[in-house]
Structures are given as structure tokens and as C-alpha cells.
Image (cartoon, helix red, strand yellow):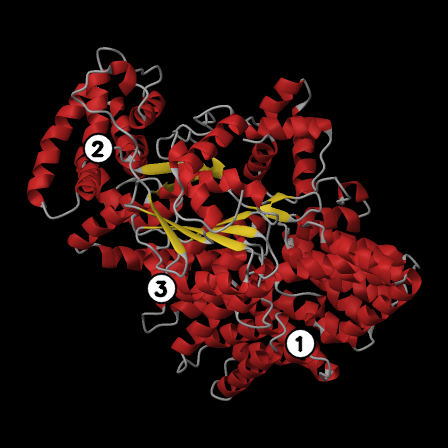
């Protein structure tokens, strides 16, 4: 794709683009229909990877067919070739996002560092914009500066395309971010979708048109059957009513329906879904009545807006009173919800059966989209439909109460997740919180508008989530805002939040912030006799001392031992374990590795008895270091590898980075300089993603420096640098494989990361088709247990945590 500046593409340019597309693909319409629900457009997938193991994009998998738009795709591609900022504009439901994703998919080979989608529709806090972009790129702010500076530093030498989807609600913030990136990053291009232009420097704007329609008076049935709007209607109609087709009997009605809806994809999909209960003729008669009524109600509005509003209102009128009210209530959720959430927030006046019936009806009527995520059924509503329901709820004065019920549900969920996080359901809770993060953000925003401690409770309860999922920067920001909002509080909730904020700041290397939080805790402790407040202070002071280069480790040990005892007496297992692990580090860094092992073995015993995973991985890192320091390198290696195995279950980069770093020191001691250099490079790369590293404990830097000197001396500069770069280029799963001694999954020249055997690839393809383990076993003539083992191996090799991720990965490898 040429990137020389150019004006709007000529007809010749568009024609050439079309010919290239047709030569490459061989067809005009994408026939892949991985999903059957009308309106289900795509599902999230994990980033694809290069041969070096680097992520090169996160474009979602299309789950329904993409109808033509060849001319628009070619025009946008040509604009993108001549402009570094292209914005697709148009009304809601016209297909801006689908067109942007199709263009992005066709040009991804032109960008060395890939194409990256950033979805902004659920984001409401403009201060989080840079963080959301960074997370989409796999980055975490390590506290070295503002996230925008981290982004600029990362992107300054990279050749990639950013797709910023749904920018209309934060135009100014998105424009400022885009201009900052484009000024500082010469090879970055941006493709945005918005209901209005960003008005950025050098911006090219493309107005997305509706799908093509025929003149309803034409009577040319063969021509009408090829219209894009009719094609879309027929494809969605066959989903609603299998076997539906355009015939001489119904072609006139179908053509008139599409023309009356002005070719708007959302309106057409909703109309096609009505075929479950109505004929095309009946649909057309309803359109005639409602269309005339809406035109009379608002002649000043643009025609297409009248049509879309009519379509939504018409669908709303076709719902029962119960379904309408549920539609209104469900609009309170951000980025979807699950059944239990609907029961707690919206189920007023309905029994369980009634709620299920109403939800099913809304799915059938294409108001809700049903999705399978991490083995859980989840529902979402298209943004336009959500806004319609929200307005209805506001008109009925119901929305404020819904918002309160929503925030109360989020608080209960966060507290329940905290309560059950030390146990066998920990990983399920981490995955659930990840899915509900947009709802949690919305609830936190609401809580911060009220004069209570709810935001403190929620943010502090999410401590493990912020830490173990690499969201230290965002978690720290929420904690800072909640603490600022409750400066007059003298409760244990505030003490807990201060302790958590201080520890997270220390993990990011922001020791000045840690010191400030400790000072606030000291002032708070002087105003209350609550023993938990004193315990949080002791832990915060101990954290500060352990993580600094010149901290008083003896005093830190006394503080952390005191904190662990109080938390054990209070039954606060999370903070008891946290204090024990930190206490072990205080002993180990102070030279008493034997006593460190006593502490850490107690922590490991607690996690093993409860079925906990994540804190145990941290404990195994501390255990491995202590065992190494007491002269037990073989035991140390096994403990560190176990820490990596545990952390890989949720693809957590932080513990993998820390354990890999420590394994490098062992490799150096065993005169395996090249392996040590590769592990150091991998640890650095994963630490950047996690936003922290082993060097949250500054005293560990001496071991890194010694290891690096020894390896440099043994290998020489060229080999040492090459080995470090090899490690830095590894993906998470490749690092896991290399650290555990399975170098077959580590990337080499020309070999992709996540290398599966032929049989495992067959199993992955069957997972992508939706088969269960029993179904896979039947298809391949193997036992269900063997099929289950293959799936587990695939998850481990690819660093995934769900079958949905396997399915998405397999689809991308198949070129779908």
C-alpha cells in the first residue's frame, strides 16, 4: 500500500483497489458466518504473533458475513494511504465499526508492527484514554511517567495502525491523543470511527453511506436480489427463518422494506429478525404506518435519523410491557452483563422464570446479543439500542434508581470476589472481574459522586485484580481518586486503601508515593485505636522498607510480623499472606534465608490447603530465591519453575518475569551464560508489560548486575546482546516454555510462537468449530480424556485460559 500523500481517491484508484481485493480474495462477500444471532458482529480474540513471538494485532474475529462495500473499502484504503488520520463518520447503526475493521483487516500486512483495535464505546473517563490504548497494545505504565509518554516512547519507532472505535463521546480527548501520537510517532497511522469528525490536523473524513438499495418501483427482481441491502436482509433472514429466500412473490416487499429503511444495516437486521413472527408483507405494512407517524413528529430531523429512530421505536412497540421495562433497565449496564447481574439489578417485579422468559424474548428480537465468553453466557446490547432504553428509563424517572442498584451490585460483586479470592474459585473471579471492568468503572464513577466510602471499599477489594492482571496504573488512579474523595475518613476502610495504594506504588517503583501513603497512614493511626488500622500501617511501613535500596530490614521484619499476626487473628487471609510473603523477603534480603523459608512455607501451606493459585506463585518466587541463597539450587529451580507454571494459568507476566530473572542468576552460577542472558531479556520484556518486575525489591539489582557482568564477559558483546534480544522477543507462552526447559515452544528464526503438534492443531480447529471434548473425541476416534489432555496442552503452550481464546487463535491461523 503506497503511503505517499494524496487527495481523495480517483475513480481509477478505486477501481485498482477493487481489482486488488478481488484478485486476493476471489470473492466479494465474506461467507464466514461463525455466529447466527442477527447483530452479532464479532468476538474478541488474542493478539496474533510474528515469528519472533511479538504481538502484531488484536483484530476481532468476524462472526457474521460482511456484505460487499467493496467501493467503500477501497476508498478508505486509498485515504489511509495518503493520510495518517482517517475518520469514518455517520449515524449510529450505519456500519462504521464493521467497515473500519474490514479495512484494517485488508491492510494489516502493510504494517510491520500490526493493526491494533482500541474500543472506546464503554469508556467514560477521559483521563483513562491513554491507559486504555496502552492496555490494548499490551503495555502497562511502570510509574516512570505519564501513560501518554509511555505510549509515545513505545510507538515512536513502530510501524502500525491504531483503530480507535467509537470516539464521539470524547472527541476532544481523542483528538488531543491522536495529534500527540501522530506528531511524535512518524510511522503510526490512525483509523477512527465517530459520529462526528475529530477535526484533527491532516484528518481525512469519510462519511459511511447506507447500503445500496433499488428503486422500489423498478420491478427488476433479478437486479434487486443483488442489492447490498437486500443481500443483508436475506442473509439475516435465513438466520431468523432457515430456508428463507427471495422469490417472485416476496421480492417486491423485500425491496420496499430495504428502501424504506434507507439501507441502514441495523434497521435492516432488526426488520429481518421480525420474520420469526411476521411475513415481509406484514413488516412492510407496519413500516408504512410508523414511518408516516414519525415523519410528522419531527420533520426537522435528518431523514436517516428519523428512519433509525423509527426502527428502534417500532421494535420497542413490538415488545410486551415486561420486555420494554427490562430493555430500559438493562441499559444501565456497560459492555454487557450476565444472568446473575440482571437478576440483582433489573429483576424487580419478576420471578426467575419471568426474567428468563423476558431475556429470551429480547434475544429473539435482536435487542440483546447472546455471547459465550469463558464458558459463561453473556448478553450485550448495541449502543444505539442501549441509548434508546436509557432515555426511556430517564423519561420514566427510573434511571437514578437503576444506577444505584447497579453500583450496589458492583460493590457486592467486588466484595464477594475478595472474599472468595483465596480459594478454588480465584481464577474464575479474576476472569469475571476482567469481563465486568467497564461496569466496575461506571460504578466507581457513580460512587465518587456520593459522600460515602463505597469507592474505597470497591477499589481496595480489587487489590489482587489490579496487581495480578497488570493493571497497576489504573488501580492506582482509582485508589488515589477514592482517597482524595474521603480525606476526612478515619476508618479501617481508608487505612486498607492507603496500604494497598502504597504497596501498588512500590511495585511500580514510585517510592515517593509510597512514602506519602505511609505518612497518611501514620496520621490516621494516631487518631484511632482500631488494631486493623495499626496492622495496615505496620504492613505499609514494612513494604516501604523492603522495597527501598537502603530500608531498615530488621524494623521491616518486626512490622510485617506484627501485621501478619493481626491479620491472622482477624481472619483476613489475603493480607496475612501478603504480609508473610513480604516478611520472607525482609529476612531473605537481610541475609537470613533460612528464616525466610519458615515464613514462606507457612504461606504456601495456606494457599495449598485453600486451592489458591496466584499468591502461591508469588510465594514460590520468594521460596526459590531463599532456597538459592541457602545453597539449594536444585530445589530453588523447581520452586521457581512451579511459580511460572502457576502464573501461566492466567497468563500473568509479573511472576513469570520475576521467576525468569531469578532463574537467570542460577543459570549464571551454573556457567550457562547464554541461557542466563536469554532469561534476562525475557524478564525485561515481560516486566514492561506487567508494569513491574523483580526489582520492586531494589536490593535485588545487585544480583542482576553481577549476572550481566559475568554473562557479558563469558559471551562477548555480540553474543550477549543477541541472546538478550532473543529473550526480549519471546511471547509469554514462549518464555514459559523456555524457562521450564521446553525450548521447542521458544521462537526461533522462521518459527512461530505457540508451536502445536499436528494433532493439537486438529484439536484446536475442532474447538474453533464449537465441539466439546466428547465431540472432539468422537470426531478423532480418541478417548474424551485424551481430548481433554490435548486441550490442556494447547492452553499451556499458547498461554491461554479459555477455549474461546483457542477458537479465536485457530481462526486467525486458518486465515478466516
Q: Residue at x 45, y 55 (%)?
A: 437
* Marked residue nearer the N-terminal end (2 or 1): 2
Q: Residue at x 51, y 84 (%)?
A: 520
Q: In terms of secondary structure, where does tag 3 sit?
A: helix
* Marked residue nearer the N-terminal end (2 or 3): 3
Location of residue 118 in the rendering, given as x and y in whole percent from the top left corner: 47, 52
Left or right of 10 in this view: 261: left
Q: Which residue is mark 3?
A: 172
Q: Which residue is mark 1?
A: 560
Quarter of the image holding residue 243? top left
Q: Decide: is 287 above or below 654.
A: above
Location of residue 769 in the rendering, given as x and y in whole percent from the top left corner: 54, 26
**Mark 2 or mark 1, which is nearer to you?**
2
Q: Report the number of numbered marks.
A: 3
Circles 2 and 1 in contact, beta carbons < 8 Å: no
**Mark 1 or mark 3, which is nearer to you?**
3
Quarter of the image holding residue 218? top left
Q: Residues within 10 Å of mark 2 (few under 14, many from 20)?
A: many
Query: As drawn, which residue projects farthest toward the top?
Result: 248
Name the residue nearer the viewer: 8 or 549: 8
Q: Which residue is mark 2?
A: 261
Left or right of 485 in this view: 785: right
* Marked residue nearer the N-terminal end (1 or 3): 3
Location of residue 323 in the rendering, given as x and y in whole percent from the top left corner: 23, 38
The answer for how far apart the CA atoms under marks 1 and 3 are is 47 Å
Name the residue nearer the viewer: 609 or 305: 305
Left or right of 588 in this view: 259: left
Q: In terms of secondary structure, where does tag 1 sit?
A: helix
Residue 770 can be seen, yes or no = no
Amino acid at each position: 500500500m503506497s503511503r505517499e500523500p494524496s487527495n481523495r481517491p480517483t475513480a481509477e484508484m478505486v477501481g485498482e483497489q477493487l481489482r486488488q481485493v478481488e484478485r486476493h480474495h476471489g470473492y466479494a462477500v465474506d461467507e464466514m458466518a461463525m455466529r447466527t444471532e442477527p447483530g452479532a458482529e464479532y468476538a474478541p480474540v488474542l493478539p496474533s504473533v510474528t515469528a519472533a513471538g511479538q504481538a502484531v494485532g488484536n483484530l476481532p474475529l468476524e462472526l457474521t458475513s460482511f456484505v460487499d462495500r467493496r467501493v467503500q473499502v477501497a476508498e478508505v484504503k486509498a485515504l489511509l494511504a495518503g493520510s495518517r488520520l482517517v475518520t469514518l463518520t455517520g449515524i449510529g447503526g450505519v456500519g462504521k465499526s464493521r467497515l473500519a475493521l474490514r479495512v484494517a483487516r485488508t491492510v494489516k500486512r502493510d504494517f510491520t508492527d500490526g493493526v491494533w483495535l482500541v474500543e472506546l464505546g464503554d469508556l467514560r473517563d477521559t483521563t483513562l484514554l491513554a491507559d486504555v490504548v496502552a492496555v490494548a497494545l499490551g503495555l502497562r505504565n511502570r510509574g516512570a511517567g505519564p501513560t501518554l509518554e509511555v505510549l509515545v516512547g513505545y510507538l515512536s519507532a513502530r510501524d502500525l495502525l491504531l483503530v480507535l472505535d467509537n470516539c464521539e463521546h470524547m472527541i476532544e480527548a481523542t483528538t488531543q491523543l491522536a495529534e500527540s501520537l501522530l506528531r511524535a510517532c512518524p510511522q503510526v497511522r490512525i483509523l477512527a470511527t465517530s459520529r462526528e469528525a475529530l477535526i484533527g490536523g491532516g484528518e481525512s473524513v469519510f462519511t459511511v453511506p447506507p447500503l445500496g438499495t433499488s428503486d422500489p418501483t423498478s420491478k427488476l427482481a433479478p437486479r434487486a436480489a443483488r442489492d447490498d441491502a437486500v443481500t443483508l436482509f436475506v442473509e439475516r433472514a435465513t438466520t431468523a427463518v432457515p430456508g428463507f429466500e427471495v422469490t417472485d412473490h416476496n421480492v417486491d416487499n423485500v425491496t420496499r422494506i430495504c428502501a424504506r429503511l434507507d439501507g441502514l444495516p441495523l434497521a435492516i437486521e432488526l426488520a429481518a429478525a421480525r420474520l420469526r413472527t411476521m411475513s415481509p408483507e406484514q413488516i412492510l405494512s407496519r413500516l408504512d404506518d410508523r414511518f408516516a407517524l414519525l415523519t410528522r413528529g419531527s420533520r426537522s430531523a435528518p431523514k436517516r435519523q428519523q428512519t433509525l429512530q423509527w426502527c428502534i421505536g417500532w421494535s420497542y412497540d413490538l415488545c410486551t410491557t415486561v420486555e420494554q421495562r427490562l430493555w430500559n433497565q438493562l441499559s444501565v449496564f456497560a459492555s454487557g452483563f450476565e444472568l446473575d447481574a440482571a437478576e440483582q439489578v433489573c429483576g424487580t417485579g419478576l420471578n426467575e422464570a419471568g426474567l428468563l422468559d423476558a431475556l429470551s424474548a429480547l434475544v429473539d428480537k435482536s435487542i440483546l446479543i447472546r455471547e459465550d465468553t469463558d464458558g459463561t453466557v453473556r448478553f450485550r446490547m448495541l449502543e444505539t439500542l442501549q441509548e434508546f432504553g436509557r432515555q426511556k428509563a430517564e423519561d420514566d424517572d427510573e434511571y437514578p434508581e437503576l444506577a444505584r442498584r447497579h453500583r450496589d451490585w458492583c460493590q457486592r460483586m467486588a466484595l464477594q470476589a475478595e472474599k472468595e479470592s483465596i480459594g478454588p474459585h480465584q481464577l474464575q473471579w479474576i476472569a469475571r472481574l476482567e469481563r465486568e471492568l467497564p461496569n466496575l468503572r461506571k460504578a466507581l464513577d457513580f460512587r465518587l459522586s456520593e459522600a460515602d466510602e463505597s469507592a474505597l471499599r470497591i477499589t481496595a477489594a480489587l487489590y489482587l485484580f489490579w496487581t495480578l492482571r497488570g493493571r497497576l496504573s489504573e488501580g492506582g488512579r482509582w485508589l488515589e481518586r477514592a482517597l482524595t474523595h474521603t480525606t476526612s475518613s478515619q476508618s479501617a476502610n481508608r487505612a486498607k486503601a492507603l496500604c494497598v495504594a502504597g504497596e501498588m506504588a512500590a511495585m511500580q517503583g514510585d517510592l515517593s508515593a509510597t512514602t506519602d501513603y505511609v505518612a497518611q497512614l501514620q496520621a490516621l493511626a494516631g487518631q484511632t485505636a482500631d488494631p486493623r488500622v495499626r496492622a495496615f500501617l505496620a504492613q505499609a511501613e514494612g513494604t516501604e522498607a523492603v522495597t527501598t535500596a537502603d530500608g531498615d530490614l530488621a524494623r521491616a521484619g518486626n512490622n510485617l510480623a506484627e501485621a501478619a499476626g493481626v491479620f491472622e487473628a482477624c481472619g483476613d487471609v489475603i493480607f496475612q499472606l501478603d504480609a508473610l510473603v513480604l516478611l520472607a523477603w525482609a529476612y531473605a534480603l537481610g541475609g537470613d534465608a533460612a528464616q525466610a523459608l519458615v515464613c514462606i512455607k507457612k504461606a504456601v501451606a495456606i494457599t495449598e490447603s485453600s486451592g489458591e493459585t496466584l499468591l502461591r506463585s508469588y510465594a514460590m518466587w520468594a521460596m526459590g530465591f531463599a532456597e538459592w541463597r541457602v545453597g539449594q539450587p536444585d530445589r530453588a529451580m523447581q520452586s521457581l519453575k512451579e511459580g511460572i507454571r502457576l502464573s501461566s494459568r492466567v497468563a500473568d507476566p509479573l511472576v513469570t518475569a520475576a521467576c525468569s530473572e531469578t532463574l537467570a542468576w542460577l543459570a549464571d552460577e551454573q556457567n550457562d551464560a547464554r541461557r542466563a542472558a536469554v532469561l534476562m531479556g525475557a524478564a525485561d520484556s515481560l516486566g514492561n508489560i506487567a508494569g513491574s518486575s523483580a526489582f520492586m525489591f531494589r536490593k535485588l539489582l545487585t544480583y542482576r548486575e553481577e549476572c550481566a557482568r559475568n554473562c557479558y564477559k563469558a559471551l562477548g558483546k555480540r553474543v550477549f546482546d543477541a541472546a538478550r534480544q532473543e529473550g526480549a522477543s519471546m511471547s509469554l507462552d514462549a518464555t514459559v516454555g523456555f524457562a521450564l526447559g521446553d525450548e521447542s515452544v521458544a521462537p526461533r528464526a522462521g518459527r512461530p510462537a505457540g508451536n502445536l503438534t499436528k494433532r493439537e492443531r486438529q484439536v484446536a480447529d475442532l474447538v474453533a468449530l464449537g465441539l466439546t471434548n466428547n465431540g472432539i473425541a468422537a470426531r478423532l476416534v480418541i478417548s474424551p480424556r485424551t481430548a481433554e489432555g490435548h486441550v490442556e496442552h494447547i492452553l499451556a503452550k499458547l498461554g491461554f485460559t479459555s477455549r474461546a481464546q483457542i477458537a479465536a487463535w485457530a481462526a486467525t491461523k486458518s486465515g478466516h
